[in-house]
Image (spheres, rainbow, N blue to C red):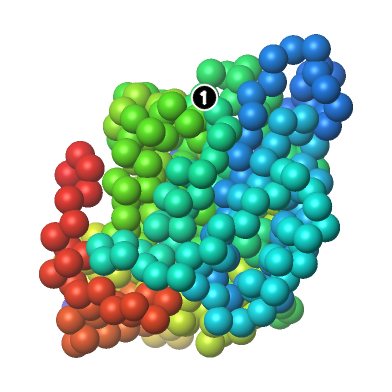
């Protein structure tokens, strides 16, 4: 009986792995690479242009980012765009962030504006409030929301704007390279990228008839008029997954959006240790599932069955079941190789997907369990009740 069940699971798992991989490969192969975009000579440089070039406002919240903030801000100011302003929001930092920003501001670059927030109003997550305050201050016709630890290459903004204008998009979400230090940890970004791709189907966001939407916190370039029509960050003020939710709100008001790969143009030092991964993802995973217990349980079980089970199955089964499970593992290895070509990163992450699936399922379940046990989540030193988070009216839902 065990082997009958194991064989059925193997058949279903192998079928899903093959079909899912083909669909995933087709979708990701359709995603444009921002590095391939050709920038017109009239607007792709920091010199005055003969053509009308829209002003772009870079908005970057910073909370305790003293280590990374200077390099990030200098990267923002080096963006190759003739009409640029950079707004950095010091959001209640308790480290040396304020001192670094004060020193940068004293250098006298008129394009840099620093806003300091001392208090967080009720009913807001800190980053969302900071983004909203930055947007209120911004004068740009386009807004680039990014993070204070992101490294941008000078040409990325011109390429993103050229792509948006040429294709008629109102929102460009660019996936950066996620950098993690050495060994197994460096492969973990591929696991997360694959889960994100399966969950969000970002390649379908450009289709106005699809419900798929996208948003990337490291690089969300948005037309100001569409951002305002969508309600801005006030519409997502209690959403930990604010980047994706903002993308959904933009699409609901008719904004056209696209997802692009920014390999070589944007990078972020994602997490420095497994402890940081655990702490960082646990605050988001339950929120990403809409605080739904059934959805978390299904997601954890599906990961363990599809990604983790084939490894012990090689020791516990034989015959056709054994070969099917081996096939699943080979398909997972191919998935990792292809994902590395798209997102960047180590090309051996596919072989480690079973290990990452166990860890990811643990994080999902622990994120849910802690939120339920505590009656809410803690975010940047502020506690938010589940009743408050679940009761927040997400637009269109």
Q: Is residue 300 left or right of residue 328?
A: left
Identify whether 14 is placed above or below 376.
above
Identify whether 342 is placed above or below 50.
below
Q: Is residue 136 left or right of residue 86?
A: left
Q: Provide the secondary structure element on which disc 1 rests.
A: loop
Residue at image position (70%, 49%) is: 112
- Give the image location of residue 33, x and y in percent: 68, 37
Residue wearing tag 1: 169
Frontmost residue, 32 versus 236:
236
- Give the image location of residue 269, x and y in percent: 67, 68
- Image quadrant for the C terminus? top left
- Give the image location of residue 272, x and y in percent: 64, 80
Q: Is residue 138 left or right of residue 344?
A: left
- Give the image location of residue 81, x and y in percent: 76, 33
Q: Residue furthest top?
A: 50
Q: Quadrant of residue 158?
A: top right
Identify whether 350 is placed above or below 264.
below
Identify whether 358 is placed above or below 325.
below
Q: Quadrant of residue 319?
A: bottom left
Frontmost residue, 271 versus 113:
113
- Image quadrant for the N terminus? bottom left
Q: Quadrant of residue 71?
A: bottom right
Dot 1: within a 10 Å radius of its alpha carbon, few (fewer than 14), some, or many (20 or more) residues?
Answer: some
Residue at image position (67%, 59%) is: 150
Residue at image position (29%, 69%) is: 286
Frontmost residue, 318 versus 227:
227
Whether residue 15 appears in this view of the structure is: no
Residue at image position (19%, 87%) is: 373
Whether residue 71 appears in this view of the structure is: yes
């Amino acid at each position: 009986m065990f082997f009958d069940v194991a064989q059925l699971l193997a058949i279903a798992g192998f079928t899903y792995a093959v079909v899912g991989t083909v669909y995933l490969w087709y979708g990701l192969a359709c995603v444009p690479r921002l590095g391939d975009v050709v920038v017109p000579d009239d607007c792709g440089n920091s010199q005055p242009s003969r053509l009308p070039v829209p002003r772009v406002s870079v908005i970057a919240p910073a909370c305790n980012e003293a280590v990374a903030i200077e390099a990030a801000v200098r990267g923002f100011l080096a963006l190759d765009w003739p009409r640029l302003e950079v707004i950095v929001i010091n959001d209640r930092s308790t480290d040396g962030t304020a001192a670094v920003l004060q020193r940068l501001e004293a250098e006298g670059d008129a394009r840099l504006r620093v806003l300091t927030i001392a208090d967080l109003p009720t009913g807001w997550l800190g980053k969302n409030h900071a983004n909203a305050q930055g947007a209120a201050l911004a004068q740009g016709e386009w807004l680039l929301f990014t993070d204070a630890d992101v490294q941008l290459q000078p040409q990325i903004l011109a390429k993103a704007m050229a792509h948006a204008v040429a294709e008629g998009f109102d929102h460009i979400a660019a996936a950066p390279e996620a950098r993690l230090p050495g060994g197994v940890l460096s492969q973990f970004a591929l696991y997360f990228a694959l889960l994100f791709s399966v969950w969000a189907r970002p390649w379908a966001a450009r289709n106005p008839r699809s419900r798929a939407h996208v948003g990337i916190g490291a690089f969300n370039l948005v037309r100001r008029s569409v951002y305002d029509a969508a309600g801005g960050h006030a519409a997502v003020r209690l959403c930990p997954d604010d980047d994706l939710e903002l993308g959904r709100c933009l699409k609901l008001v008719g904004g056209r959006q696209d997802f692009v790969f920014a390999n070589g143009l944007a990078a972020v030092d994602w997490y420095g240790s497994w402890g940081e991964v655990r702490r960082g993802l646990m605050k988001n995973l339950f929120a990403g599932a809409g605080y739904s217990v059934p959805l978390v349980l299904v997601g954890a079980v599906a990961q363990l069955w599809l990604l983790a089970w084939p490894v012990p199955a090689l020791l516990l089964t034989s015959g056709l079941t054994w070969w099917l499970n081996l096939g699943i593992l080979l398909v997972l290895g191919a998935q990792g190789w292809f994902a590395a070509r798209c997102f960047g990163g180590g090309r051996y992450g596919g072989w480690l997907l079973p290990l990452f699936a166990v860890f990811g399922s643990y994080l999902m379940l622990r994120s849910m369990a802690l939120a339920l046990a505590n009656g809410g989540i803690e975010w940047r030193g502020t506690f938010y009740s589940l009743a408050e988070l679940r009761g927040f009216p997400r637009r269109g839902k």
